[in-house]
């Protein structure tokens, strides 16, 4: 066996005969028990071993308990012919358990003899089996998966229930039955009707037994007549039945020929074609998802009608393709790991570059801030120096002006007239003090000169020995506006 094997089936609580067997029956409880290796359902195994849980959202014991609990709570309403209704539990023939069996070409004996060698490919096969199963199932499905190593080949049992459905309808998980149900809803039936049955003759009425008589002779005569009538009735019935049998046999032969001819003309029923196509597609998809990557053939030699040599060559090709696929997958993973490493390194490099840019920007901001601070300080220093120079110049001009006022008074160029000091050169002095860039003399200098003018006025007054001029600040020499 080097080809894939997957079998799907649904089961109810009612016993279901196994195809090809006369005394073998299966049920949901029996299938669950066999998967769990219950002693009662494991008599076909020489040395039963506990199953290995390999997948599922429930363990096999949890799965069995939950399904039993849900089944006990399901009820349905039945409407009778007279319109009355009654409630009952779910019918026993309702399919509530969906199963899949996946078998690997490797024998259990080979696997257990060298687990180190066979473990990785079996694990990869099992992972693909479960991934494909989950991809095919709708939402709201509970399932469990166990691995058996106590029979001829390594195989996996998957048990599932349609928990989202109010009646746990397992047929809605079966690819073939789903396709058939959809076809049945959307298309008219192409079932070939039988020929009308012939109208059969009715049996004659049985002679009534005469009433008992007290007279023995009369009773004896009545019994004799009744026996003869019954014998005649039986003969007549036999004749009617023989005639009816001839009619029935002729109808059956004619109807059989009619159905054969009609089926030959029609071909297989459309619903069967749909069912078969869906199951074939399931196997094809399974081959692409599981069989091909694991080096398994799509079909065996008998179905493919291949010779032993051809089959052996095809197995070698399949193994080579699987090895190539595994090698390519390993290379892909290695490249993916390198790409991930490069991406990580690139991200780290970009992070470092970003950090350096941020540090450089921060340093630039600090440099600009320091430069601006130095410029502001330099501007302030220059302004202060200019202010000091200006004040120094004003002070120098003020001292010179006071010297000129004193010289003018001393030389007589300045007169004290009616308490007012008059100097011909005063506008020139004021202009020199203000300079080209000032509109007025600063207040301290102005106060200094005004104070000096008052002092000169007082000195002049004493010298002239007369009433000193009235010193009015408003009448003192004005320095600008």
Image (cartoon, rainbow, N blue to C red):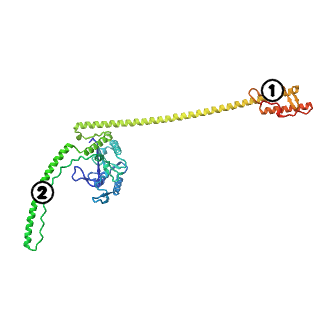
From the viewer's side, name the closer residue of 173 and 419.
419
- The image shows residue 188 at horizontal and vertical percentages of 26, 46
Vertical relation: 275 (above or below) 65 = above
Q: Secondary structure at mark 2?
A: helix
Q: Look at the picture and state if 172 lies above or below 456.
A: below
Asked which secondary structure carries label 1, the reply is: helix
Q: Quadrant of residue 304?
A: top left
Q: Which residue is mark 1?
A: 427
- Label 2, residues with CA under 10 Å away: few <14, some 14-19, many ≥20: some
User: Residue at left 13%, top 66%?
Assistant: 208
Q: Name which quarter of the figure residue 477 lies in.
A: top right
Circle 1 Cα neighbour tier, 10 Å, few/some/many (<14 / 14–19 / ≥20): some
Q: Which disc number belongs to residue 135?
A: none
Q: Which mark is residue 241?
A: 2
Residue 108 visible in the displayed image:
no
Horizontal arrangement in the rendering, residue 369 relative to residue 353 (left or right): right
Compared across the picture, whether 44 is left or right of 214 comes to right
Q: Quick one: quadrant of the C terminus?
A: top right
Is residue 281 shown left or right of residue 386?
left
Q: Earlier in the sequence, mark 2 or mark 1?
A: 2
């Amino acid at each position: 066996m080097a080809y894939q094997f997957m079998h799907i089936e649904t089961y109810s609580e009612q016993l279901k005969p196994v195809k090809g067997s006369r005394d073998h029956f299966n049920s949901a409880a029996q299938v669950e028990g066999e998967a769990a290796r219950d002693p009662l359902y494991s008599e076909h195994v020489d040395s039963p071993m506990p199953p290995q849980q390999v997948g599922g959202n429930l363990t096999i014991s949890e799965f069995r308990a939950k399904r039993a609990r849900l089944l006990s709570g399901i009820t349905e309403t039945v409407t009778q012919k007279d319109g009355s209704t009654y409630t009952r539990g779910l019918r026993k023939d309702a399919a509530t358990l969906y199963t899949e069996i996946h078998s690997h070409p490797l024998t259990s004996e080979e696997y257990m003899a060298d687990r180190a060698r066979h473990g990785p490919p079996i694990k990869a096969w099992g992972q693909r089996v479960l991934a494909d199963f989950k991809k095919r199932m709708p939402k709201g499905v509970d399932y469990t998966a166990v691995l058996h190593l106590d029979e001829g080949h390594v195989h996996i049992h998957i048990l599932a229930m349609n928990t989202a459905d109010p009646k746990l309808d397992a047929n809605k998980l079966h690819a073939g039955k789903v396709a058939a149900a959809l076809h049945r809803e959307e298309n008219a039936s192409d079932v070939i009707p039988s020929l009308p049955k012939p109208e059969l003759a009715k049996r004659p009425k049985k002679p009534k037994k005469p009433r008992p008589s007290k007279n023995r002779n009369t009773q004896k005569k009545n019994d004799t007549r009744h026996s003869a009538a019954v014998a005649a009735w039986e003969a007549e019935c036999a004749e009617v039945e023989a005639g009816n049998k001839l009619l029935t046999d002729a109808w059956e032969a004619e109807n059989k020929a009619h159905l054969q001819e009609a089926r030959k003309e029609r071909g297989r029923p459309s619903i069967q074609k749909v069912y078969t196509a869906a199951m074939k597609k399931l196997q094809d998809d399974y081959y692409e998802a599981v069989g091909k990557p694991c080096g398994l053939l799509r079909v065996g030699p008998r179905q493919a009608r291949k010779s032993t040599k051809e089959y052996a060559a095809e197995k070698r090709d399949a193994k080579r393709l699987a090895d190539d696929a595994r090698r390519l997958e390993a290379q892909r993973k290695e490249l993916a790991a390198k790409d991930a490493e490069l991406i990580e390194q690139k991200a780290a490099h970009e992070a470092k570059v970003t950090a350096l840019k941020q540090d450089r920007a921060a340093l630039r901001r600090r440099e600009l801030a320091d430069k601006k601070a130095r410029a502001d300080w330099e501007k302030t220093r220059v302004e202060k120096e200019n202010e000091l120079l200006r004040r120094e110049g004003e002070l120098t001009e003020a001292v010179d002006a006071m010297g000129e006022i004193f010289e003018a008074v001393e030389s007589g160029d300045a007169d004290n007239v009616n308490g007012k000091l008059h100097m011909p050169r005063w506008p020139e002095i004021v202009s020199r003090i203000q300079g080209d860039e000032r509109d007025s003399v600063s207040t301290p200098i102005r106060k200094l000169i005004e104070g000096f003018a008052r002092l000169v006025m007082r000195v002049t007054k004493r010298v002239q020995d007369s009433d000193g001029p009235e010193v009015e600040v408003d009448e003192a020499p004005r320095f600008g506006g």
